[in-house]
Image: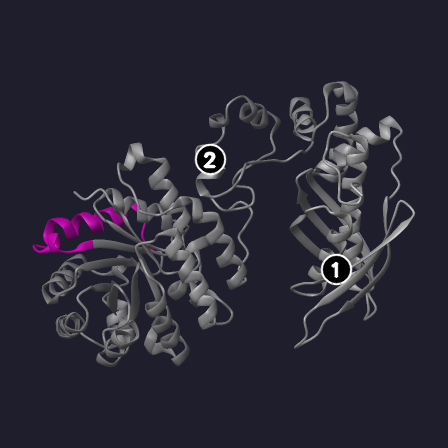
Amino acid sequence: MNDRVFIFDTTLRDGEQALMASLSVEQKLRIARQMARLNVDIIEAGFPISSPGDFESVATIAREVKGPVICGLARLIEKDILTCAKAIKSAQRARIHTFIGTSAIHAEKKLHMGEEEILDNVTKHVKLAHRLCDDVEFSPEDAGRTGADFLCRVVEAAITAGASTINIPDTVGYTTPEHFARIIDDLFKRVPNIGKAVISVHCHNDLGMATANSLTAVSHGARQVECAVNGLGERAGNAALEEIVMAIKVRKDLFRLSTGVNSKEIMRTSKLVRDICGMPVQANKAVVGANAFAHSSGIHQDGILKAKQTYEIMTPQSIGLKEARMNLTSRSGSHMVKNRLLDLGYHERDFDIDALYVRFKALADKKGTVYDDDLITLIEAKSGDDLGDRFVLEYLNVSSGRGTVPTATARILVDGKLFQEAACGDGAVDAATKAIDRISGYKLTIENYHLDAVTGGREAQGRVLIVGRSEEGTFTGTGTSTDIVEASALAYMDIVNKIARMKRFNRKLPASRIEAR
């Protein structure tokens, strides 16, 4: 049996159905190009008959994205199939994916058809699709609730008519792994021409079993999995692409299979889909969640420091992350605190870990997560070092609006001398932070930005919290103002000053541009 599992990505079709608004052609094209870098086998680019915009998206992707098979969806209706064929005609490799409901409830309540009429439609329209495109996939919709005898007859008819891929969809997330395994086994045993087609599965997550059902089907002979990045899709979503790929990779000993996916592009793809679709990824989401490689327990952190395999079954690097994140909380042990301080460039002689750990625990109990700048403040406060701000924002002017390029001018007092810089950006806040960067010389990446109203009314004060990462570590900054841009700039300046204090205390760190003057 073939040891390769084909990954069929339906983020742009089924995934888009879960969004509040349709994606533009340009947005879909960006995602499709990233899917090609991810090296999925098939991209289901859309449902061409559904709207002129979707037709244009599918046609554009078919024309411009090379590598994966570009697939369009069509109901088992002549007009749908003709439209789909037209949309994908310029693809390097094209596929028509056609479907019809086969469960009793779909046949009776939605289609008003009997079994024989459905079978006639399958034969007629799969033949039409095959005349227009060599690569045809057929799905008996709601296969999970379709009678076994009729499902076998439909699958046999579709293969005879020219379908080279048969997809078995658990359209409403009804099945369990044991139930789904029986369906797949039954098809392999009872359909005489089953060896002429690749068996695919498309599982929804209504009962939280989409990934489990998909992997069970793979174990029973399915060789294509239809899935979506971040598990996007109708209702509770589809099987998550990242979970399918990494399960097969990590448990190669169990599945003895592989995919062609470049797993190091998973995190990049997840973030792109998250940002374009406006669909947040839950922190505890498997593989790509913010906490997927975060360790807070002192026992876990101790194990990770000694041997990463103790609590990590896959490496952050395998999905495109640089490193795991160690959360410093009240559960962290003194060994983790000490290790983090050494990573920040301090020497053991710079602190008494026993005394420092007592103060660390008290701070952690109050605020939850302790960031790098909190540790630095603990050390500086003990040493009596000057905690004053080295960089003071004296002036900020921002210009932005529809049809204009956002620009900002910042004037900052540094050690008694004024410096002024201007910058353009992708929005007023971005322009302001870039102007500040030009003066401070620090290279900061904003990892989290949060805005809250701290008072009521139209003139409410906004409080901005920024979590930023630089080569010196991870820092938090806060700023408050009735002007959101000013609050953001003050929060950013808070981080800049924390970095400055850290550099002042630890002379081994590289100097900023100001210090080098």
Left or right: residue 367 compared with residue 417 = left
Q: Quadrant of the N terminus?
A: top left
Mark 1 element type: helix
Amino acid under disc 1: Ala
Within 10 Å of the Cα at label 2, are there few (<14), some (14-19), or many (20+) other Cα atoms? some
Regarding residue 238, the answer to whether it shows in the image is no
Left or right: residue 319 compared with residue 371 = left
Q: Residue furthest left?
A: 192
Residue 299 x, y percent position in the rendering = 58, 24
Q: Residue at x 80, y 45 (%)?
A: 514
Regarding residue 414, the answer to whether it shows in the image is yes
> Which segment is the magenta one?
174-198
Instruction: Give the colour scheme shown.
Output: one colour
Residue 330 x, y percent position in the rendering = 69, 31
Mark 2 element type: loop
Q: Residue at x 47, y 70 (%)?
A: 26
Q: How many marks?
A: 2
Q: Nearer the viewer, residue 433 or 459?
A: 433
Q: Nearer the viewer, residue 275 or 429?
A: 429
Vertically, is 364 above or below 416? Answer: above
Residue identifier under label 2 = 315
Residue 447 x, y percent position in the rendering = 63, 49
Amino acid under disc 2: Thr
- Residue 444 on the magenta segment: no
Vertically, is 69 above or below 187? Answer: below
**Mark 1–mark 2 distance (CA, rounded to whole Å):** 36 Å
Q: Quadrant of the C terminus?
A: top right
Whether pointer 1 and pointer 2 mark residues with C-beta atoms closer than 8 Å, the reply is: no
Residue identifier under label 1 = 432
**Residue 142, picture quadrant:** bottom left
The dominant secondary structure in magenta is helix
